Amino acid sequence: MKLLGAVYRKEMIDGLRDRRSLLSSFFFPFLAPLFIYGLMTLMIEQNTKKETIELPVIGAEHAPALIQHLVENGIAITPFTEDAEQAIRDKTVDLVLEIPADYQASMAAFELTRVGMIHDGSRNDTRATVSRVRQLIRNYSNELNALRLISRGISPRLIQGVQPKNEDIASEEQRAANLLNYIPIYVLMAAFVCGLGLAIDTTAGERERRSLEPLLINPVPRLMLIFGKWLAASTLSAVGMFITLMLCLWTMLALPLDELGLRFSLEHSQIPLLVLAILPVPLLACSLQLLLGLFAKSFKDAQSYIGILVIIPVLPSLVLQFYPVTTSLWMYLIPILGQSLMIKEILGAEPVAVSAYFLSLISTLAASVSICFIAARLLNQERVIQG
């Protein structure tokens, strides 16, 4: 333990002396919450503001009742006589409504009347406008159908049939956590970013500076050297991850989620649970970085290899996004996936089984220690020491 403590102190002192690398590593924990706050604030403003939509219409005189309905619902109608498709391509307008000349005739004959909505479906900035106008036309059609039935002495309820009744049992906290499902990504990603500089420097960096071989001459077991470097890098990684977690939680509390019909509250008892859930992640991240740092031929080569590891925290969320599955106990045995599930469940105020914490901790810690043993074995190979 004395040897391990000596190596740990040596690596921590070296890591803290490199101020530039330290600042660059801890730039992410402060950048991620600011990005979240700005992105969510922009989304809330777009979903809550009610602005008048200017809608160019071709043939507005053919459907005065429909035009009146749109105007009453905040749509500003402007006559349009140019080439609609070309105007959409040139992005001078977002949407053009085209009313056919036989609109009144088809309505009088009770035929299906189609109103053209010309827009560019590949533009994300026009989707809200297109969706709002389409919904208003649908509402007008429903009202028109009901009036036609009433004029003939038929109740509109006869055509309602079966309608689903929405009974969402999810709490406001669960819906808020589901909306902010990228919070676990940033928290776990911080573990792979903040200890990255020290992990590379103590492996590929020392070998490139030719200081690794003199270090191995000392009467210290290879395993103790790896464990000391591993714990030092994991310490910086854990500090950065906890800073990211606290700032992300503060950001969520500061956001006006109530304007979206959501509510996020944080109990004091949830913070220790979150810390316990993510505690083993820095150990796994730094063990992988040390191993790849020894495989790399140079410091620059190590940076290119280890940069791929940052994708690991994103994978569980992507998999669950495109292939949603029911959470099972065995999922907590998978490192990173188990932590992602626990963070989301804790933020959603859902109960997490005690066995989930145990399984996640044991599996991630076992994987981390195994990787460190492999790294220690590599230090016995001359090609690894010489690069």
Image: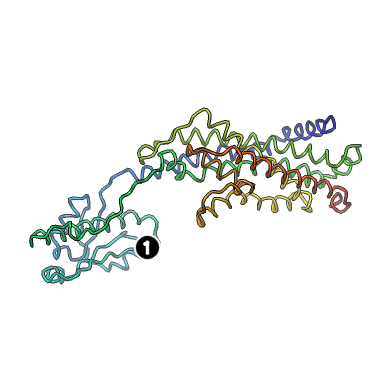
Residue 366 against residue 110 in the figure, above or below: above
Q: How many marks?
A: 1
In the displayed structure image, the side of residue 350 where residue 166 appears, left or right: left
Residue at image coords 24%, 63%: 97
Q: Position of residue 256 (x, y in %)?
A: 39, 36
Does 353 sit left or right of 217 as displayed? left
Check the image and report above or below for 359 versus 130. Answer: above
Instruction: Decide: is 381 above or below 227.
Output: below
Residue 196 in view (yes/no): no
Looking at the rendered structure, the secondary structure element under dot 1 is: loop
Q: Tag 1: residue type?
A: Gly
**Relative to 110, is 12 above or below?**
above
Residue 348 in the figure: left or right of residue 75: right
Q: Callout 1: few (<14), some (14-19), or many (20+) C-alpha neighbours within 10 Å?
A: few
**Closer to the camera, 238 or 304?**
238
Task: In this rendered view, identify the residue nearer to me: 234 or 155.
Answer: 155
- Image side of residue 336 versus residue 374, left or right: left
Coloration of the structure image: rainbow
Work out whether residue 231 or residue 91 is closer to the camera in this orientation and state it: 231
Residue at (62% x, 50% y) in the render = 312
Query: Is any atom of residue 315 visible in this view?
Result: yes
Picture coordinates of residue 385 (x, y %)? 86, 49
Residue lying farthest top? 268
Q: Nearer the viewer, residue 7 or 52?
A: 7
Residue at the spot of label 1 = 121
Q: Quarter of the image containing the N terminus?
A: top right
Q: Position of residue 276 (x, y in %)?
A: 61, 35
Q: Which image quadrant is residue 264 in? A: top left
Q: Residue at x 64, y 41 (%)?
A: 191
Across and down, in percent, residue 237 comes to: 66, 38
| Quarter assignment of residue 86 | bottom left
